Image: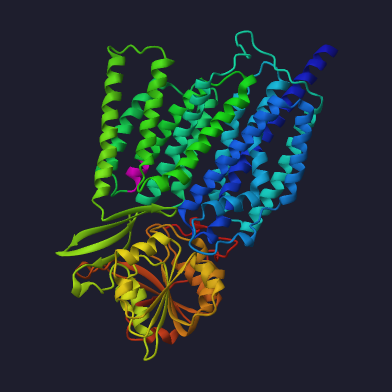
Amino acid sequence: MDRIDAAEFVGKKRTMLTLLYGCTIFLSAFLLFQVQPIIGKMLLPWFGGSAAVWSTCLLFFQVLLLLGYLYAHWTSRFLVPKKQALLHILLLASSIAVLPITLNAAWKPTGGEDPTLLIIGLMAAAIGLPYFLLSTTGPLLQAWFAREKSGTVPYRLFALSNFGSMLGLLSYPALFEPRLTIPDMSVGWSAAYVVFTLLCAMLAWRGLHAHRTVHVRADVKADQRPSARTLAMWAILAACPTILLMAVTSHLTQNVAPVPFLWVLPLGLYLMSFILCFEGGNWYRRIWYLPVFIVWLGVMNYDLVEQIAVQGVWVPIALYCSGLFVSCMLCHGELARMKPHPEHLTSFYLMIALGGATGGTFVAIVAPRLFNSNYELPAAAIATALVIVTLVRREPADPRPRIPGYRVWLKAMVITVALISILAVAGIARQNSMHRVLARNFYGTLRVTDANDHGYVVRQLVHGAILHGTQYLYSERRRWPTTYYGDNGGAGMAVLATRHAGQQRVGVIGLGAGTMAAYGRAGDYYRFYEINPLVLRLARSQFTFLSDCPAIVETAMGDARLSLEREPPQQFDVLVMDAFSGDSIPVHLLTREAFAVYFRHMRPGGILAVHISNRNLDLAPVVKHASDYYGKEARLVDSDEDESRGLTGSAWVLIGDRADIFDAKELRDSVTAIEPESAIRPWTDDYSSIYTILR
């Protein structure tokens, strides 16, 4: 009886130990991905709300993940358990000193410089050490687990880690962002991190009396080190899906709809593939995924040339996200097949992190400087195909299917798709050569194209699928304000309604092609605020709105809000706020604190015009809340499309300090009241949630 009780006690002790390891790994992964959108949201107000900020954040996280895995590998290989435990406990204690996570205002950008390195440095100062230690947890604790529970293969803990990562990622927009302010989330995350450090320190403390031994199953040779080719293949199989993840995200946000949903969905599918492949439930079969991937590769490359899915929303999302998932299942499935004995576990994870960091560096830093368009998407897909075909030839895994001539058909499909891929790249290059200008930088790809519009040649500035300005090249129409800025829209009406005998002062947040300068008269003053230096270069070299304008025209480079905060009051008669990129909104320009900055620069009787055209979000209540808070009057202006004058339909909110401003003849027949929306929580620098204003 005593022996049974002792056995039950030992069994319960092992169960509790396994539960402790599992909880610590799950919590670390959850916090690892929960902090990414939190710190990203803190950064956006300083860097223009660009989607490229997210790509740079991903690069930072991948590099820190690599350093964390390198630390886990080095300490497991070269330090005895006691020294490793003491070092880790010391680092855990030190990391608590930087909590709660905040940003140092000394890092704020000052102009239109490339912000990549600035973002990385700022994140390193704000969250570097805690994130580094969280990134070490997965491989480090799996190595400790294998050491304590001899003969146990810990790879299911890797699946658990990715499950925690996915929950951390998805719970932010669904649970935390709609309910909590940024300070609340920072404090909550920091408190959870303290719990993690205590759990991890408990496990590290056990290492003070541990021995560096791993018992080996009889059928596995632990002393057989992975070859250089195997190490390289691990890294390549990790790099390909990372490049595809970031390239697909960039393609969808630029050509479908630049909304945060399309940042989260691809990353969620990427993590899901890790979970399924390493969970141990035989979710991966090469024979299932390889044919589907080959077909998708051909369809995707054809779409990149012919743009068969560009007009819809859900079709391209389904096409590219399903292809990304299949590609990730292939690469991560092959990684799971090649996983080594736990003795070499840290080497395995180190190569995965190296591949991820390499892929992230290529997309975030190399590609924007090497390519003038999104060539990394077809290039990564083709590279993935070549890697998988190489594995199929050298390391057959599945039993040969009972299909006559299967290998012949497979080779024929591979050759065909390879030819389609090559032709696709050539087709994209040919298509890009048709643009007058195609240029790319941190903020994305811009193209200038000449087109025919009802018998007139027009020049267009386009970012992804979003039109940022149009100008007639016909001399008699060259100074016509077009697109959203016609005299039937809110911005044009505001300018015409506030004109007076003296100098009219107009501020414009968002330069585009410089269309608003078409309203300038001799003696007027126009000041544009633009964050992207490439936009300014193209507006000056490819369009003539700025050079034709008889008014005094100046441009302030950098984030508009930061520039306005530094400047003395400008006494604008009209301030136009139009810094949106399609449906992607720079939230920091719509908060209560931002409107305080705008109103500081308005003269009495002036009008603030806020562009709110959006297919997915109802921004009118957000603007209404801000105007009501400061005792201002807000009215809505909806304009219709007029193709004969090159005008597009648009929605604007005009804000003034008194109601009689809207009695001007240019406004009174076009403005309507905005119904208050009490269910919408006012946006501040500490709180905003786009999910509360979805249409």
Does the magenta stretch mainly form a helix, a strand or a loop? helix
Is 130 colored magenta in this rendering?
Answer: no
Name the residue furthest top: 218
Q: In this view, does 150 lie above or below 156?
A: above
- Is 207 left, or right, of 591 in this rendering? right
Give residue 643's position: percent from left, percent from top: 21, 66
Residue 146: which quarter of the image?
top right
Name the residue furthest left: 455
Q: Which residue is drawn at 71% across and 21% down?
A: 147
Query: How many numbered marks does the figure carry?
Result: 0
Which one is nearer the viewer's eye here, 122 or 195? Answer: 122
- Is 683 left, or right, of 548 in this rendering? right
Q: Quadrant of the N terminus?
A: top right
Q: Quadrant of the C terminus?
A: bottom left
Q: Is residue 695 above or below residue 410?
A: below
Which one is nearer the viewer's eye here, 340 or 347? Answer: 347
Scheme of colours in the image: rainbow
Give residue 409's position: percent from left, percent from top: 27, 18
- Is 624 left, or right, of 36 in this rendering? left
Q: Is residue 323 visible?
A: no
Q: What stretch is highlighted in magenta?
A: 313-318
